[in-house]
Image (spheres, rainbow, N blue to C red):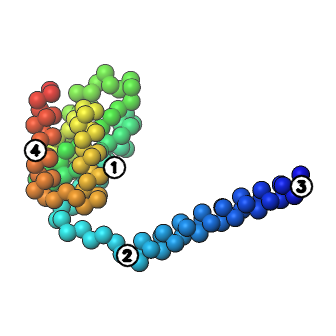
Amino acid sequence: MKLFMKVALLLVLLFGFTACNQTDENTETKSKQGAKINTASTYDQTPAKRAEKIVKKRDEVTEAVAFNTNKQMLLTFNVKQFDRFQLKRHEKEIKQQLQKEFPKKEINVTTDSKITQQIGEVKSKIKMGTMSSKKLDKEMMRLIKLMNEET
């Protein structure tokens, strides 16, 4: 029985070290290949990140997602359950606060969960570098139109 336990422990350790060794080889191969170069020119998303931080500082906000173009910014946020009774007031206050912070941009604010999901998809495409400036402009206009239709 002791021999069986020793052989089993040896096999487990052997497989464990082999699995770790394979991951290290994969990361070395990836680092030799170099990073993917982003050729699509997109807008600087620093204002959107700053707007997210500003909105997340509010007590009632649980999540905020935003992206921007040169002239417009679209922000969506979620609030705590009890604060949902005053959504319009929160939207108005946040929009005024962001307009003071970003006077040169047209600010659009919503709490619609469908638009939140779509903005999240747009942000992931921006991070991956697959969204060009033209596509971003079209997506912004489509989401603003969708946001205005549902109200």
Q: Is residue 51 above or below residue 41?
A: above
Disc 3: which residue:
2
The residue depicted at 48 percent of the width and 70 percent of the height is 27
Ranked by sequence position, the earlier of labels 3 and 1 is: 3
Q: Position of residue 23 (x, y in %)?
A: 53, 66
Q: Disc 3 versus disc 1: distance between alpha carbons?
A: 59 Å
Q: Is residue 106 visible?
A: no
Disc 4: which residue:
141
Disc 1: which residue:
53
Q: Are marks 4 and 3 in contact (CB under 8 Å)?
A: no
The residue sitting at the top extreme is 85
Q: Nearer the viewer, mark 2 or mark 4?
A: 2
Quarter of the image that includes the C terminus:
top left
Ranked by sequence position, the earlier of labels 4 and 3 is: 3
Residue density around tag 1, few if under 14, some if 14–19, many if 20 or more, within 10 Å:
some
Q: Secondary structure at mark 2?
A: helix
Q: Is residue 103 above or below residue 13?
A: above
